[in-house]
Image: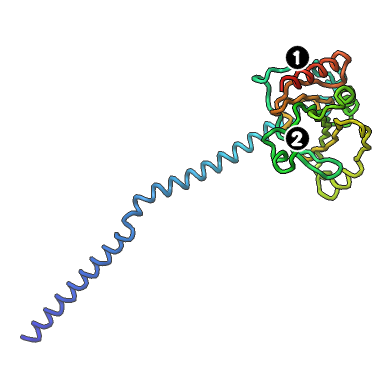
Amino acid sequence: MATTLNRILKHRSVSALNKHHQGLFSLTRYENHDSLPSQMPALRSTTRSFLDFYKFGNKKAIEDERARLNDEMNRGYFADMKEFKEHGGKIAAANKTIIPAASAIKFPVLAVTFSNGKSLKLPITPNSNEVNTESLVVPKVSLVCLSFRASSQEMISSWSKPFLESFGNRKDLQLFEVSFIDKWLLGLAPIRKLLLRVLQKPNNNENSVLQRQVGYAFGDHYYFRKEIKVLNLLTGYILLLDKSGRIRWQGFGTATPEEVSQLLSCTSLLLEDQ
């Protein structure tokens, strides 16, 4: 009888202990992960957002590249040449007056390297890093001449030479002639260094206060061209910038005597206005 009673009590104790352990296990399981169900939607949402962003970024890049390819194909060398034969590089007449500051667009930042290896970013404005680190003087007016192909070098000179002759004694002006080199091989550091040495030109204006600064822009400049609306790469682009880096006047191709007079007149007005 006693043996039977002890057996029953032992069985009940074991059952109770098992139930107690099960309860503890269940409690521990939910205590450790009771927030997991509420976190799962957020986790799924975050993952989905990241994937959507990744897909959107890829899609945007693909669309931009497709638009660029289409644009480049439509405006290739043969299209430029056909247009060049029609107007000789004069895609438009030069501005007769200064572009109002309120409607003038900002000249995009452009990294330029000179034949001596020195580099700077145009335009030079009061906020330029070069002004703060190298103590450069901010010019009141800058004439920036852009050449994308060798065919436009003589066009550039038709503007820069009379500009230099008229304002050669001014310290508050800058004159830049920038040639674009978009061949990736020529942009490699060793080849670029050799190329700059070969391209180095003698300074024929040693007695002039205003110096003609010849620089080179290496690499892909598609978006730069888009911003300032460069269409035909065979012609030259002449831009007059104010102290804030805004384009206040522009000319194209080979200068006519009338256009040179307009450039000089607008430069004088800008100098008085700055």
Q: What is the number of the mark on residue 151?
A: none
Q: What is the number of the mark on residue 97?
A: 1
Q: How many labels does the image show?
A: 2
| Nearest the eye: 250 or 27 | 250
Identify the image quadrant of residue 222: top right
Residue type marked 2: Val
Identify the image quadrant of residue 166: top right
Q: Residue 30: horizontal and vertical position, in percent? A: 29, 59
Q: Mark 2 points at which residue?
A: 137
Residue type marked 1: Thr
Q: In this view, does 55 lie above or below 272?
A: below
Q: Marks 1 and 2, how far apart in space?
A: 27 Å
Give the left or right position of residue 222, taking residue 31 as reference.
right
Identify the image quadrant of residue 174: top right
Q: Residue 80: horizontal and vertical position, in percent? A: 82, 25
Mark 2, Cα crowd under 10 Å, few <14 / some 14-19 / many 20+, is some
Q: Residue 209: horizontal and vertical position, in percent? A: 86, 31
Q: Residue at x 74, y 42 (%)?
A: 134
Q: Which SS class for mark 2?
A: loop
Q: Nearest to the eye among marks 1 and 2: give it.
A: 2
> Can the viewer see residue 222 in this picture?
no
Give the left or right position of residue 226, taking residue 262 as reference.
left
Q: Residue 215: horizontal and vertical position, in percent? A: 83, 37
| Nearest the eye: 156 or 61 | 156
Give the left or right position of residue 85, taking residue 52 as reference.
right
| Nearest the eye: 225 or 179 | 179
Q: Which SS class for mark 1?
A: loop
> Can the viewer see residue 53 in this picture?
yes
The quadrant of the rendering that contains the N terminus is bottom left
The quadrant of the rendering that contains the C terminus is top right
Sequence-wise first label, 1 or 2: 1
